[in-house]
Amino acid sequence: MSIQERQDEVIEEFEMFEDWMDKYEYLISLGKELPIIKEDKKVEENIIKGCQSRVWLAADLQIDRIHFTADSDAIITKGIISLMIRVLTDSTPKEIIETELYFIDKVGLKEHLSPTRSNGLVSMVKQMKMYAIAYSTKV
């Protein structure tokens, strides 16, 4: 499945909910489903700078695709990083670098998050793209 197809799938899922309280609950449930990151990945260098809560993001290149794992100490933030991983993981560095993440605006994430969480989302996207840039030289 391509990044675009995964983005469209997320948009479709969010359209099922009428109000933002239901969407927040959905985000929380996504966070609860996020596979647990290995403890050796929960280190200072994997913390995303710019997030109000602590978010650990690790990336591994597996053949020609990047696999992301993450965790957070905040439930909404954990749901947000879970969404980001769902959309971007197991894609090539080139796909990640070149993709416009339109689902963020389509589902209304930025406008319904607090300013600090919105800044954290921007930092998540930036960090994931930085991993892709770093790994693009190895593919």
Image: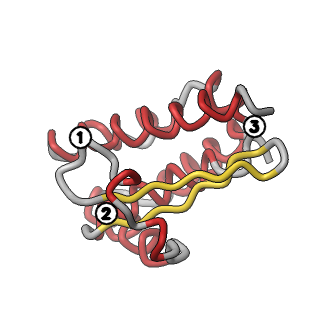
* In this picture, residue 28 sits left or right of residue 54: right
Mark 3 burial class by Cα count in 10 Å: few <14, some 14-19, many 20+: many
Pair 2/3: label in front? 3
Which residue has dot 3 on it? 92
Position of residue 128 measured from the top left corner of the image (x, y, whole percent): 51, 40
Q: Earlier in the sequence, mark 1 or mark 3?
A: 1
Q: Nearer the viewer, residue 40 or 64?
A: 40
Is 31 placed left or right of 133 in the picture?
A: left
Query: Left or right of 121: which side holds 117?
Result: left
How far is mark 1 from mark 3, CA to CA?
25 Å
Quadrant the C terminus occupies: top right
Q: Classify 75 as above or below 9.
A: below
Q: Which mark is residue 24?
A: 2
Query: So how many labels did they put on this image?
Result: 3
Q: Secondary structure at mark 2?
A: helix
* Residue type marked 1: Gly
Disc 2 to disc 3, how far (Cα)? 30 Å
Relative image position of residue 118 (x, y in whole percent): 25, 40
Residue 12, percent from left and from top: 58, 50
| Residue at figure coordinates x 54%, y 46% from the top left | 11
As drawn, the label of residue 6 is none
Q: Classify residue 80 by image quadrant.
A: bottom left
User: Circle 1 — which element?
Assistant: loop
